[in-house]
Image (cartoon, grey):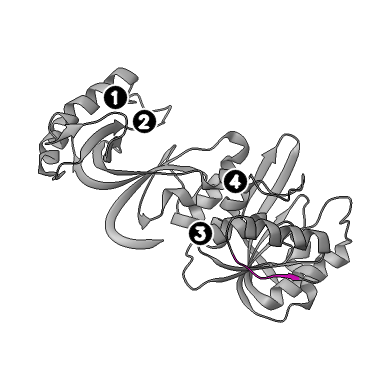
Amino acid sequence: MDRKLSTYIYVVAANEEERSLCMLEMRSLFGIEPTFNLLESPIRIDPSRSPFIKTRIEVLFDGSGVEEIGELVQKIQLDGATFKVVAIDYDNPYDDTKIEYEEKRAVEREIGLHIKGKAEMRMPDRVFGVVRMGGRWRFGECAMGEAIWLKHNDKPRKYSTALSTRVARAIVNIAVPQTAGVTVIDPCCGIGTVLVEALSMGIDIVGREINPLAAIGARENVAFFGFEAEVVLGDMREISERYDVAIIDMPYNLCSVISPEEKLEMLSSAWRFASRAIIVTIESIDSIIEQSGFEIKDRCTVNKGKFTRHVIVCERL
């Protein structure tokens, strides 16, 4: 992630079960939430980082209407490249200026006619987006998000109770919005779902796991995707190194039943080795978090049927 003087508009989409997670990820990455399906920010994020960002528009021109945008796009130099213009919906149910299908096609044609070059609808060299937002029209170059996490579903070791790759990726973004120079640990890494997502984003992360079979699975999964990461077999309460962030998916299945006292020990140890923690739990443990020395800064829930996970952002007091 980097910051430029440019303005970017992000097209965001989430289903109801994951909307709370999406909002927390956006607050973590940008410091704000989207307005319906659009978010404007000076922060540049690769749209493939997030499972919820579909498109990024780097704004080149701003105008009061389609005619003004049409005049401005004549400045674009394509140097022989083909192009396509896509009109993007501002999904505001309370806005009676919503662009309908036929109008979108008309806007695309109108602007496209003013661009000096060859239009190509199927496989263009460059894609431009136009959107009406806040009473103004914005036009710019589009970057489309790629669902990288979907590829990580095809791994050799799987657990039915593990985080989905989609949820894991969002949690990594919540934990590490700025990746440069940040050290991260997943001290209950299981089969390495979080490790794989973090490594695919170039994040410096290590894993630890008390279950020998799970630790073997994590190493196998990490290697399967061509990544390298240390996965230590051991109890997180024995960690002596220091990290900027810990991502802790609390044990909860029938083979990992732990008492409130053990949970407090785990989180107290995390307080010693990490300045910040993202805690994932299926039950309310606010009082245990507070007893451990962490302060809750933000949170969300992720629903899957009747199953609810709590994602809690904590910082050391």
Which label belongs to residue 104? 1
Residue 9 visible: yes
At which x and y percent is residue 195?
Answer: 63, 60
Dot 4 or dot 1, earlier in sequence: 1
Give the labeled residue for mark 3. Answer: 201
Q: Is residue 85 above or below residue 167?
A: above
Q: Amino acid at mark 1?
A: Lys
Which label belongs to residue 89? 2
Which secondary structure lies at badge 4?
Answer: helix
Q: Amino acid at mark 3?
A: Met
The residue lying at 73 percent from left, 56 percent from top is 191
Q: Is residue 245 above or below residue 73?
A: below
Which label belongs to residue 166? 4
* Viewer-side residue, 231 vs 143: 231
Q: CA distance from mark 1 to mark 3?
A: 35 Å
Q: Quadrant of residue 296?
A: bottom right
Which secondary structure lies at badge 2?
Answer: loop
At which x and y percent is residue 6?
Answer: 27, 55
Quarter in which the N terminus is drawn: bottom left
Quarter in which the C terminus is drawn: bottom right
Mark 3 is surrounded, within 10 Å at the Cα level, by few (under 14), some (14 to 19) or many (20 or more) other residues, namely some
Check residue 120 for magenta coloring. Answer: no
At which x and y percent is residue 286?
Answer: 74, 59
Q: CA distance from mark 2 to mark 3?
A: 29 Å
Q: CA distance from mark 3 to mark 4?
A: 14 Å
Q: CA distance from mark 2 to mark 1?
A: 8 Å
Q: Is residue 242 above or below residue 195?
A: below
Contact (CB < 8 A) between labels 2 and 1?
yes
Residue 262 in the figure: left or right of residue 97: right
Dot 1 or dot 3, earlier in sequence: 1
Magenta segment boundaries in residue numbering? 228-232
Dot 2 or dot 1, earlier in sequence: 2
